[in-house]
């Protein structure tokens, strides 16, 4: 479980992979369609997709000659669970006061 | 901002670094105290701390001869924000039904 948490966190740490997730969250797509907006080779995109698959964030099914990719959100739940245990640390009144004074300082500069 | 998101996600993708965060969330500590539970050299722990510092998750202050480390949770808020945009994908009724039937199947096996 913790091992997979590592894989999922590494998978989402790359902006291209986060963009692929964003695309697939809108609906399943063929890998060649997913690749269109990225300034890299199809092989490069395939490598990113493999990292996402290893983390369980993308599932691949064969349709005719090409693979269809589907987003699977569940592994993100575990990451959210780990992060949200620290929510109270960024949600304290002190933090909000600090933000208020920093913003005030920045304005007056 | 997205650059930092990458750093934070990489920082939390390692179990040792997550454990250091867990320790510092209980209160500030000297690096030598933080290092105690880990089966690695102080240099190894220092490297992990540097990754956490780069991500803004740990702040270091000098106290006499040794550094004190402090947890800073704010960068996690941004990660939580990114992840929680996909919450509805793992919270759908379909997912819950799927879980229910998988659990039922496992029980009957």
Image: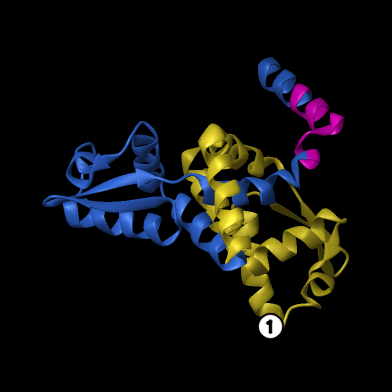
Chain colours: A blue, B yellow
**Above-or-below relation of A60 to A90:** below
Q: Nearer the viewer, residue B26 or A81?
A: A81
**Above-or-below relation of B30 to A8:** below
Q: Residue furthest left?
A: A65
B95 horizontally vs B31: left or right: left
Residue drawn at x 45%, y 58% as measured from the top left: A55
Q: Quadrant of the N terminus of chain A?
A: bottom right
**Above-or-below relation of A105 to B5:** above
**Where does label 1 land, which residue?**
B40
**Above-or-below relation of A102 to B44:** above
Q: Nearer the viewer, residue B99 or B83?
A: B99
The percent coordinates of residue A39 (x first, y second) are: 21, 43
Which subunit holds the residue at mark 1? B
Range of magenta residues: A88-100
Residue drawn at x 84%, y 72% as measured from the top left: B33
Q: Quadrant of residue A89?
A: top right
Residue B35 within the magenta-colored segment of the rendering: no
Q: Main secondary structure of the magenta part?
A: helix
Residue A35 seen by the camera: yes
Q: Nearer the viewer, residue A10 or B66?
A: A10
A19 horizontally vs B6: left or right: left
Residue A98 within the magenta-colored segment of the rendering: yes
The percent coordinates of residue B90 (x first, y second) are: 54, 40
Q: Secondary structure at mark 1?
A: loop
Residue drawn at x 83%, y 34% as measured from the top left: A92
A35 horizontally vs B1: left or right: left
Characterize the local packing of mark 1: few (<14), some (14-19) or many (20 or more) Cα atoms within 10 angstroms.
few
Q: Residue furthest front?
A: B108
The percent coordinates of residue A106 (x first, y second) are: 67, 22
């Amino acid at each position: 479980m913790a091992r997979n948490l590592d894989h999922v966190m590494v998978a989402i740490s790359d902006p291209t992979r986060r963009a692929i997730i964003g695309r697939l969250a809108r609906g399943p797509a063929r890998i060649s369609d997913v690749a269109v907006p990225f300034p890299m080779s199809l092989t490069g995109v395939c490598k990113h997709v493999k990292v996402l698959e290893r983390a369980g964030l993308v599932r691949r099914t064969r349709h005719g000659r090409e693979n269809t990719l589907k987003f699977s959100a569940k592994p993100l739940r575990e990451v959210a669970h780990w992060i949200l245990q620290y929510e109270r640390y960024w949600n304290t009144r002190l933090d909000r006061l600090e933000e208020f004074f920093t913003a005030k300082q920045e304005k007056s500069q």
